[in-house]
Image (tube, rainbow, N blue to C red):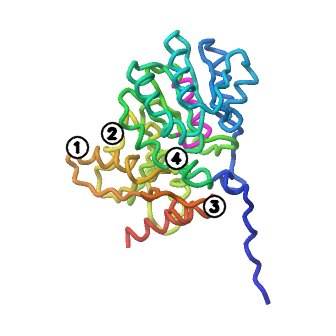
Amino acid sequence: MTTASKPKLKTSAMIASFVDDGQKTTSAPFGHALVKAARENDKIVGLSADLAKYTDMHIFAQEFPERFFQMGMAEQLLLGAAAGMAETGLVPFASTYSVFAARRAYDFLCLDIAEPNLNVNIIGGLPGLTTGYGPSHQATEDMAIFRGIPNLTIVDPCDSIDIEQAVPQLAASDGPTYLRLLRGKVATVLDEYDYTFELGKAKVLRGGNDVVFVTSGLMTMRALQAADRLAEHNVDVAVVHTPTIKPFDAETVLAEVNTDRLVVTLENHTVIGGLFETVASAVVTAGLGKRVVPIALPDQFLDAGALPTLHERYGLSTDRIVAKVLGELA
């Protein structure tokens, strides 16, 4: 007698969606939201570093070819050109992979865009562990790199709702922004929680008496899933979604943290320099003396492989979150 083996993951799983089978999704929410915003604001332009198709910018390019600029594989040029356009009063949205914006074009973002506080919106694809192609494409430290730049707003959306509502707010905000893009078929989660995105604000999605999850990005989806699973173990979990990492809504978060509940941060980013350290800094500055438990990627270069395997290996899967919390409460 033999047992059925799991189906072998194909190479395509290395860039597969992290969305679960059967989950509600929205196709290319960023691209469609940008088109909608551009219809209402003729100052919006789009740029890409030869990655329009892979950052959903191609939807904008098809709708507004005269307002789209293909810069080729030259990220410094991408951000330099976006800065020049912003100086003339345009509102650029510049898309590339997060690793290239953070590692290759940092100085251009810092001095050409952030220092003069220009309204340039950087759209970074493949943030954190959303690809299995290894360290060259896994932007696990992008927020750590960018948090130190003055004037820069950092947004880590959970789902299609966050992205759709964030785009017009980013276009209307003063100064530069960085959006950690979720592309393709993106989960639609927050519509079930009476939620609206507000730039710079955290939102309590659900209450709970035992544990508080402070989350951002795709990990908010996982946090909500884990909260449902933990309820089966009689563990009552609150979830606080913090889509804006900088400026950070410490007031809302600390009001939830300053209780006798276990506090856990969840992020699709290295444990160094991201949400965990942002929350921990706010806790220490406020003098709360509260322990904060991180669920995050390790401080190391990650393996290549299939996304489901990597999320399980590095602790981002729902199963690993549930196990971590139960271990803390034991």
Name the residue beneath numbered marker 3: 305
Extent of the magenta region: 157-170
Name the residue beneath numbered marker 1: 285
First along the sequence among labels 2 and 3: 2
First along the sequence among labels 4 and 2: 4
First along the sequence among labels 3 and 4: 4
Q: How many marks?
A: 4
Mark 1 vs 4: CB contact within 8 A = no
Picture quarter containing residue 29? top right
Residue 250's disc number:
2
Q: Which kind of residue does numbered mark 3 sit on?
A: Gly
- Residue 268 place in picture, x, y as percent: 50, 51
Q: Residues within 10 Å of mark 1 (few under 14, many from 20)?
A: few
Measured in 3D between alpha carbons, the distance from the residue under mark 4 to the one under mark 2, in whole angstroms, is 25 Å
Above-or-below relation of 323 to 195: below
Image quarter where the C terminus lies is: bottom left
Measured in 3D between alpha carbons, the distance from the residue under mark 3 to the one under mark 4, in whole angstroms, is 15 Å
Mark 3 vs 1: CB contact within 8 A = no
Q: Is residue 49 left or right of residue 122?
A: right
- Residue 61 place in picture, x, y as percent: 72, 24
First along the sequence among labels 1 and 4: 4
Element carrying mark 1: helix
Q: Which kind of residue does numbered mark 4 sit on?
A: Ala
Name the residue beneath numbered marker 4: 139
